[in-house]
């Protein structure tokens, strides 16, 4: 059997065979009916996954492209309040700085957002709010519904990054007041990296900027998608669209509720293992900020060197993630995204437990058994 690494990362994730196989075919005309049907299937299935009835487009570009499309089309020249408690909230802030007057509403990474500070920014005239719903850099889920209510109270546009929650957790873009929401293909959808999708509501269209990005001009995407045949304005990454359509069909076949429940069960099992080992879950939660259901972040115990610890796991054919920026060497992260299930999760936890012992840490209890109890 061909030996492949098991990616238990917060993206990219293992892809089902039929998703991989979808890319292995001859090229097709991206201005023809077949591509239009493929694109239409993606949009049809993704809308309920987003929790939206708004217009939705697929972009040949990663999640960061969709982030930039959201800000670049609707935020140019505007006052933008950017909520930051991790790497990707910070990325949205950096994008916003290029298009408008951006103000960072920051909290320590992995801690609850300062919603009172956000309201002060709104009172002072912020016209757009950006939020990462599921901040994978620290494995915390932020209160999108509360942020949406605040934005709507002050008539500000709400941009929600759902890149690592859409397709793996409960997301209700319309009900939460998200005027613009985005997802990445290689996360919970279990498709190849390189595509993203963005939904846009009527309040956002009413505030479309005159000076927009060229390649990411959503007015151009809207025009192409409203034609007799659904098209993209520029040449799309056709093999990736083929794979995304297959991944979307798998989501539809599994059922969204079942898929969300699976993600929650797997992440609960990982957290149970960490607690059993006597390790500290990294994020600080409260009534509004909860643990991510698609990735778990755990503090590396004293005396354990990250490179040796994760290196031992990699030698067993499994990859987990480390910390980013100032959290490098301080935390490790295990993904529960996409098409993985109990076998992959238990194998990963067994490898982690073995590596902890190999690198000088004595677990308090049996994490694998604790996880099996959740999964059983």
Image (tube, helix red, strand yellow):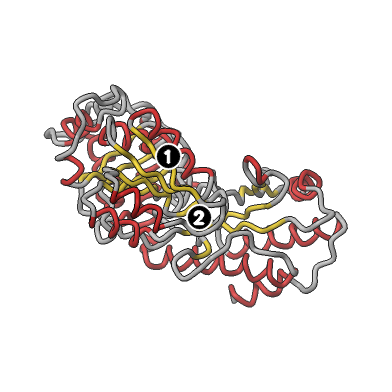
Question: 209 or 298, which lies in front?
Answer: 209
Query: Where is 151 relative to 220, above or below?
Result: below
Observer able to see residue 104: yes
The spot of residue 193 in percent (x, y) is 47, 38
Quarter of the rendering containing residue 261: bottom left
Residue at the (62%, 42%) spot, across then down: 324
- Mark identifier at residue 339: 2
Q: Secondary structure at mark 1?
A: helix
Query: Which tag is nearer the camera, tag 2 or tag 1?
Result: 1
Residue at the (34%, 55%) spot, across then down: 119
- For this view, does 11 lie left or right of residue 307? left
Q: Which numbered disc, 2 or 1, marks the residue that appears first in the sequence?
A: 1
The spot of residue 144 in percent (x, y) is 37, 58
Residue at the (19%, 26%) spot, across then down: 210
Observer able to see residue 43: no
Mark 2 and mark 1 residues within 8 Å of each other at the beta carbon: no
Residue assigned mark 1: 92
Query: Where is 23 relative to 188, above or below?
Result: above
The spot of residue 212 in percent (x, y) is 26, 26
Q: Residues within 10 Å of mark 1 (few under 14, many from 20)?
A: many
């Amino acid at each position: 059997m061909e030996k492949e690494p098991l990616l238990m990362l917060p993206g990219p994730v293992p892809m089902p065979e039929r998703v991989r196989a979808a890319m292995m075919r001859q090229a097709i005309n991206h201005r023809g009916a077949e591509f239009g049907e493929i694109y239409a299937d993606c949009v049809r299935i993704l809308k309920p996954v987003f929790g939206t009835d708004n217009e939705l487009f697929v972009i040949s570009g990663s999640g960061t492209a969709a982030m930039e499309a959201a800000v670049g089309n609707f935020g140019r020249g505007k006052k933008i309040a950017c909520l930051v408690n991790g790497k990707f909230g910070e990325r949205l802030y950096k994008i916003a700085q290029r298009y408008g007057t951006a103000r960072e509403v920051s909290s320590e990474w992995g801690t609850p957002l300062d919603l009172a500070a956000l309201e002060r920014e709104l009172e002072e005239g912020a016209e757009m709010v950006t939020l990462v719903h599921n901040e994978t850099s620290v494995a915390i889920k932020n209160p999108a519904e509360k942020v949406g209510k605040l934005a709507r109270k002050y008539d500000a546009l709400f941009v929600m990054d759902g890149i690592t929650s859409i397709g793996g957790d409960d997301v209700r873009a319309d009900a939460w007041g998200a005027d613009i929401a985005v997802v990445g293909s290689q996360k919970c959808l279990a498709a190849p990296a390189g595509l993203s999708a963005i939904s846009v509501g009527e309040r956002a269209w009413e505030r479309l900027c005159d000076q927009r990005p060229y390649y990411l001009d959503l007015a151009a995407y809207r025009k192409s998608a409203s034609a007799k045949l659904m098209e993209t304005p520029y040449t799309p990454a056709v093999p990736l669209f083929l794979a995304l359509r297959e991944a979307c069909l798998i989501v539809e076949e599994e059922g969204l509720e079942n898929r969300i429940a699976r993600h929650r069960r797997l992440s609960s099992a990982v957290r149970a293992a960490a607690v059993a080992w006597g390790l500290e879950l990294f994020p600080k939660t409260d009534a509004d900020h909860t643990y991510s259901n698609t990735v778990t972040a755990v503090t590396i115990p004293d005396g354990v060197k990250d490179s040796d610890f994760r290196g031992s796991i990699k030698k067993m054919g499994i990859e987990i993630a480390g910390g980013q920026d100032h959290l490098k060497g301080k935390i490790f992260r295990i993904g529960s995204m996409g098409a993985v299930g109990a076998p992959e999760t238990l194998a990963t936890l067994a490898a982690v437990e073995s590596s902890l012992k190999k690198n000088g840490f004595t677990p308090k209890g049996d994490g694998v058994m604790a996880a099996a109890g959740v999964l059983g």
